[in-house]
Amino acid sequence: MANARMNIAVVFDGELETGGGYQQQLSTILELQKLNKYNFIGVVFSTDNKNLLESYGIKSVLVKKSFIDKVFRFIQRQEWFFLFSAKLKIKSLFELMLDKNDIDLVYFLAPSGLSLDLLTHNYITTVWDLCHRDTPEFPEVNHFRQFELREQNYSKSLKKAVAVLVDSELGKKNVVRRYGVDKNRVYPASFLPSINVNSKNVVDVKKKYGIEGDYIFYPAQFWSHKNHIYIIDALVSLINEGVKLTAVFSGSDKGNLKHVLKYSESQGVAAQVKYIGFAPNEEMYSLYKQSLAMVMPSYFGPTNIPPLEAFAVGTPVIYSDLNGLREQVAGAALLCDLKDPKSLASHLKALLNSEEVRQRLIEKGTQRLAELEKTSITAVIETILDDYAVKLKCWKAG
């Protein structure tokens, strides 16, 4: 079996508007194509994603999420049905598709409840963060049973996984500590900048969006934990010192956009806040490149995509001074105290007043990205698959 091409189902879920998580999945599946000794098959749940992967030459299988299958999966996960389904060997439509395509191993690019439905297939799963444990007060990880749903998934899926991919050493420690997973099966792998910033497509974004003077850029969905409010407070602080700066926000609305825009109005800085919606991929390079800095005062981590994209483009980064996030940038960003908006205001003044400071941050960002690329997903996945291929011979012929 060592010389055979294992069939790996790579589950690619989500929509473009989900932002960094979607882009991370896309970047990963494209990187996997470098491992040509294995046969990767994309598993998607929308025609758009199927067409996207096939435009990159990646074979993909479309799985339709029917109502009947959702009901079956719900019943299958109930404790009372566990022994019954095991005896009858009833499989979900998702797993029947895996059988049909002779899949040897499933790789979930994002956390997925589908792993709970697998009866005869091993899998690799992914944990991006455990922020429902770190900061459970935020609505997006608390309301409408979100906390409980995440706990159900992680507590049941992680221990059974062949491997668990996490974003950092801190992520590994948290998975091992909180869910009792064998540390030897948890693999840190660096996130990748999205492919959009590699295009270097130049667009005059200031002209297009009517931006006067310098601006800071924050590409993030409008969740409360993204902390757009903090930037608005910093703009107010700058105005009080006679400094005018524009904040450009891009990203889809996850329920907090109205609050952010209303808050900017109440603070008298609505004219300095530009919400441009979900920015087209071809504009991302220019939005980063032409900004004074990429500012991300998020409460969630330990890893986020925008700092990596800013590093790749050559844009200074201002980031949250929080455990995990500071480790991600490792001295290549200015860190701000989330309890004090004047901390951000001070950093922005430093960038406005000193090109030397900007250039030093850009150089450090380039160096940091090069360091992170040494633990890329490709090398980590290859190690996992090589080990699995040897074991697979014990029960399946090549």
Image (cartoon, rainbow, N blue to C red):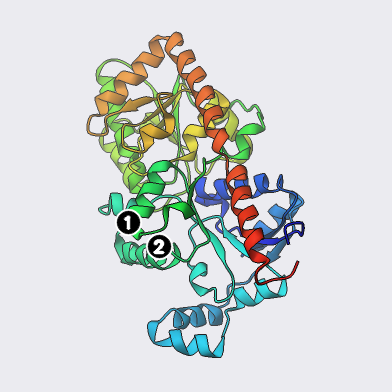
Choose top left, top right, bottom left or bottom right for residue 282.
top right
Circle nearer the viewer, 2 or 1 = 1
Q: Position of residue 289 (x, y in %)?
A: 55, 24
Q: Position of residue 267 (x, y in %)?
A: 26, 33
Q: Is residue 207 visible?
A: no
Identify residue type, mark 2.
Tyr
Q: CA distance from mark 2 to mark 1?
A: 10 Å
In-front residue for pair 35/304: 35
Choose top left, top right, bottom left or bottom right for residue 332.
top left
Identify residue type, mark 1.
Arg
- Tag shown at residue 154: 2
- Tag shown at residue 178: 1
Residue extending farthest to the left is 339
Question: On screen, 132 above or below 303?
Answer: below
User: Do the CB atoms of the residues marked 2 and 1 lie less than 8 Å apart?
Assistant: yes
Q: Position of residue 196 (x, y in %)?
A: 62, 38
Residue at position x 61%, y 47% in the image = 28
